[in-house]
Image (cartoon, rainbow, N blue to C red):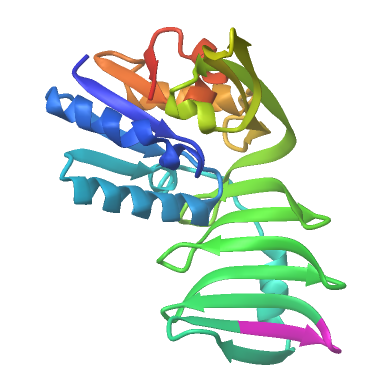
Amino acid sequence: MKKALILVTDSVSIKNPYLLKTIQKLTNNQIQVTVLVMILDFHLASKITEKLTQKINDSHFKAQIINWFELLQDQQGITTDLQGLEAVQSNHLQKKSFRLTEQKTVERFFDHHALIGEQTFRADKLNLFKSFDNGKLLAQYYFDDQQKVREVVHFQEGQPVTYEVLNNHQQKLYQFVVKPSQSHRFKVASDSEFATRGATINQEIFKGTPRNTVQIEIVNAQYSVHDYVTWRPYQNVFEFYAEQIRQLTNNGQDTGVFMDLKDVEPLSPYLETVKTFNY
């Protein structure tokens, strides 16, 4: 193994104490390390990428950090419309502005006292737009540094139900539909740092002494995936992750893939030709 791809799929993985330890061990062994932040929420992915970059720089590790959205910038997509956003920008509505901090400003748009839109600016750049109907959040539009919409998240009853991912030409690439989460149980050593994760289901006591295994429960988010360009069907988001990983690693040649413990069981079956490890 000459290269390693380390997968981060949510904000929990970045808190895994073995993440930085794994990066350090690999780089000490002269293995080229790439960390792929593959989080579906655009702003959260950017935030986690920034945090990871800072941690790795502070630790003086030699590792490349890639935000999955950066890989999609120039990927060909299909034309889309941004109706909720365009409706506010094209109408003469009552607007109220609020400067919340030196770097953050909010503009709200009203139609006969009914809130229908809200824009958030950071450092004078449009960062987020929210559309409302009768006070209920309908959608959020996430903007990149070039003021392009890179993701639209649709809501029902205040909860996200679909994520639409766009390239930097504001063309649609993928849609992720939220499905009920699934929980997985693992047995780990009771002195492992993993033993504190999730909910402890059981810890056996033998003659007054804890056994060396603890059963923990970890919840994995579930999504169905729609590819707007190829219309390739995916069984679930983990099959989709696997396809992206195979493309990045040339189907696993000379590259090992490291993932959080909770991703091993659902993701590994789709990476049959790739060497996989957990961190």
The residue lying toward the viewer, choosing from 204 and 149, is: 204
Image coordinates for residue 56, horizontal then vertical, percent:
25, 45
Q: Count the marks: how many?
A: 0
Asked if residue 111 is among those painted magenta in the image, a careful observer would answer yes
The residue lying toward the viewer, choosing from 192 and 96, is: 192
Residue drawn at point x = 71 percent, y = 39 percent: 177
Q: Is residue 171 above or below residue 95?
A: above
Q: Is residue 208 left or right of residue 169?
A: right
Image coordinates for residue 254, horizontal then vertical, percent:
24, 14
Residue 32 visible in this rendered orientation of the protein: no
The residue lying toward the viewer, choosing from 241 and 213, is: 213
Residue drawn at point x = 49 percent, y = 36 percent: 9
Q: Is residue 186 above or below residue 33?
A: above
Residue 63 visible in this rendered orientation of the protein: yes
The residue lying toward the viewer, choosing from 276 and 177, is: 276
In the rendered image, which quarter is residue 34 located in?
top left
Image coordinates for residue 23, horizontal then vertical, percent:
26, 32
Q: Residue furthest front?
A: 208
In the rendered image, which quarter is residue 178 located in?
top right
Point out the image quarter for the C terminus.
top left
Image coordinates for residue 77, horizontal then vertical, percent:
53, 44
In the rendered image, which quarter is residue 95 located in?
bottom right
Point out the image quarter for the N terminus.
top left
Q: Main secondary structure of the magenta part?
A: strand
Residue drawn at point x = 63 percent, y = 48 percent: 164
Asked if residue 199 is among those painted magenta in the image, a careful observer would answer no
Magenta-colored span: 107-114
Residue drawn at point x = 40 percent, y = 47 percent: 74
